[in-house]
Amino acid sequence: MAEVPTLAARVLRAVLLILLAGGVLVAVSTWVNGRAAARQAYDRLLLGAASDIAESIRVQHGAPFVDLPVSAFELLAQAPDDRIHYAVRGPGGQLITGMDSAVPVPDAPRRPVYFDARLQGEDARFVRVTRLFAEREFSGEVSVVVGQTVRARRAMALGLVTDALAPMALAGVALLAMAWLVARSAMRPLEALSQDLAARDPYDLTPMPVEGLPQELRVMVGSVNHFMARLDRQVEAMRNLISDTAHQLRTPVAAIRVQAEGLQEDGTPRALERLLARTRSLGALLDQLLSRALVTHRADSAPRVAVDLRMVALEIVDARDHELLAPGVEVRLEIGADPVLVMAEEFSLGEAAKNLLSNALKHGLPPVAVGVDRRGAEAWLWVMDSGSGPDPAIAARLGERFARSAASREDSAGLGLSIVMAVASAYGGRMATERRPEGFVMALVLPVVAT
Amino acid sequence: MLGQFRNRMITMGWRRMIQTILTLFGGALLAALLMATGPARAQEDTARFGSGATVLRVESTTDIAIFSPVMDRFVAENPDLSVAYEQWGSNDLFARSRAACNGTRPPADVVLSSAVQQMVWLVNAACAAPYLSARTQALPGARRWRDELWGITEEPAVIIYNKRLLAASDVPRSRFGLLDLMRSQPGRLRGRIATYDIEASGLGYLFAFSDSLEATTFGAMLEAFARVGAVATCCSAEIIRSVAEGRILIAYNVLGSYVAAAQEPDVGVILPEDYTLILSRSLMIPKGAAQPAAAGRLLEFLLGPQAQAMLMDIGLVMRVGPEETALLPSARRVIALSPAQLVALDAHRRARLIALHADAFRAEARE
């Protein structure tokens, strides 16, 4: 497997790349500039020397005479290690004085002209200066060619480049060191976090501390904490499910066993009837357990959407499940014309409503009404029966798991209202009861979504 | 001495005649060209040092007699080398080196010459090979050029006088003193002041050229020489002998090392206090030398402390100590190995300086 580089290495590599690219850019540009500067500086020396020599020419006995000035050569000696060429030529190109080596002089107008050529196998730079004589004894053009090898020019250009690059290299090293330090200090909280996580008990899902963390890390740790909270709830729900299931199944299974044994002894149709009823109620209990587990799971995992509570109430009534539970009982639907929207999940809301309705059918008196109201910022999904409601002692414990009353029927598991409670708490609401002259109301109250 | 042999090939007269012919043609360049294409010339003297298998060919203007102790020591320290030493006149050596540079004859391995301007010309014409070491880099800037030319010695141009004939109070300590003396005692000095004939002597020309660059006293000196009828003569040995014998009272611009070598007790030496020209005999390794590595070893040896001490004993390197001379450091004028020496070889410039000089020394005849 290819090694994935560390973040610090990536940062360092990026800085190094920037530095290298910058260095190459600076080197190239200073080289170009330095060469131009060196060329200009030494071209001036060359021109100065050539002009000096041209100045020193005078006409003597009808011929040009060159009183070669030492100053010209001292000018040229500013490039101490470069070889020199000089030649003074008369109108016909014949050598007056100087070195008779073949330097190809370009044809050019009568002003100083620079050119590059080879001098004894070395690159060299030349200048040609002409001087026009118009005297009685001599007239014509005398040209002075002065050349010099380019060692000093190259050394100067190179010097300029190194002068520019040396501080940059130093700055680069400093920058690299700083980048490394910054990367290290930025990574330190991450290391601390991972150490914290590694040292944790596997069941410890408490949030990690976010104090003193940089903003960027806070976001990440926040998501991790959020995820761990969800995991915590899931684990809790799972635990509850398992213990509930075990607790709930014990009694009916024991009852079924007793009845089956009775059936073995006398085999009356009545005993068979009771055994069937027991198994049916066991099925209902399993349904409720599953439904509650599902609600708890979905509340955490399913995306929340805007749901119209009226539609939920309408579906409950339309499904006519209550006709199975309590045949002949009339269920009214009381909903308004305006939608009542909450942010929730439709399945969970349906389960809560179903349980509210079946609770009313089981414990209350007909007729029963299902309705949806909007009260200020709250949306009420309520079920009302015509009875007077439970005793205050029981009402206080409504919604707890397995809160079964004396009035609870055999097939009740006591889970119905706890499902409603779970849905209410999952979506930021509550369960409410209300005593009205016409009956007892139980409701799922959720915050309204502004439309 | 074992392993050495010498033979004088030509006489001074022969040499003098050739030089006279050359001066007839004017500039040294022209002369050198002619010699390069002319009939082969023989060396003044040859010697062989050591018996090593590798032969290092040295062509030099320095007298074998002066240089042999140094060479003996060199071959003693490098037993694998032997040195074939040829002594040449400076103009002949220049012509040979140019011919070698053109490829018309094989080059020597080392060329050592007192004619600095000719050596600079050769290096400028790309006739030399580079060599670089800690010792060459330690040389002052005036004693090296392009890492192809190095000044080995330090020899002052001095004023000499006859100690018996010139009272201590009359001895000139500087050019100004000499000028004053010539002005105040023209009758006594008439015909008894000498300097080099710069047409005949390459060294004399180099000193005169350097004088013409150094100071405004040059014009005054020429004028005064003309007034007292100074003698222009060709050769160091001749001048020193004349001073020793008293025929000449004072000689100007004589190479100090020759005076030291002559060991004449009656000859007094003055390093002019206004400024003293210092000649550095220069060495180059010709391009295409057969033994460049051995040549480098000779250069290293000559620049080393041992050889420099020996050269100091011979008088080829000036002692720098308070007890020896009163010469101020600011009065030292080393004839620099720099491209400015090319001017000295310029035909027009040379013709003009020689004409000036000749005018001054002909003045006596006109009077």
Image: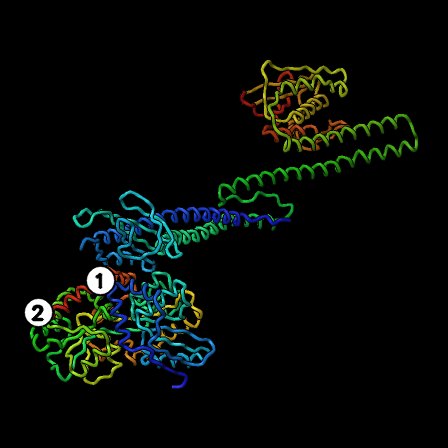
Which residue is denoted by mark 1 in the rendering?
A: B351
Above/below status of A405 relative to B33: above
Report x, y in % for residue B173: 15, 75
Picture quarter with the N terminus of chain B = bottom left
Labels 1 and 2 share a subunit? yes
The residue lying at 27 percent from left, 50 percent from top is A143
Q: Which residue is mark 2?
A: B367
Q: Closer to the camera, A12 or B47?
A: B47
| Left or right: residue A219 compared with residue A345 | left
- Residue B198 percent coordinates (x, y): 22, 69
**Mark 1 vs 2, N-terminal side:** 1
Is the image coloured rainbow, by chain, by secondary structure, or in one colour? Answer: rainbow
Is A117 placed above or below B37 here?
above
Q: Judging from the image, what secondary structure is the residue with disc 2 in?
A: loop
Label 1 residue SS? helix
The number of discs equals: 2
Residue occupying the point 66% across, 31% down: A298
As shown in the figure, which amino acid type bears the numbered disc 1? Ala
The answer to whether residue B206 shows anywhere in this view is: yes
Identify the mark at residue B171; answer none if there is no mark.
none
Pointer 2 local density, CA inside 10 Å: few below 14, some 14–19, many at least 20: few
Q: Nearer the viewer, residue B202 or A288?
A: B202
Residue furthest toward the right? Answer: A266
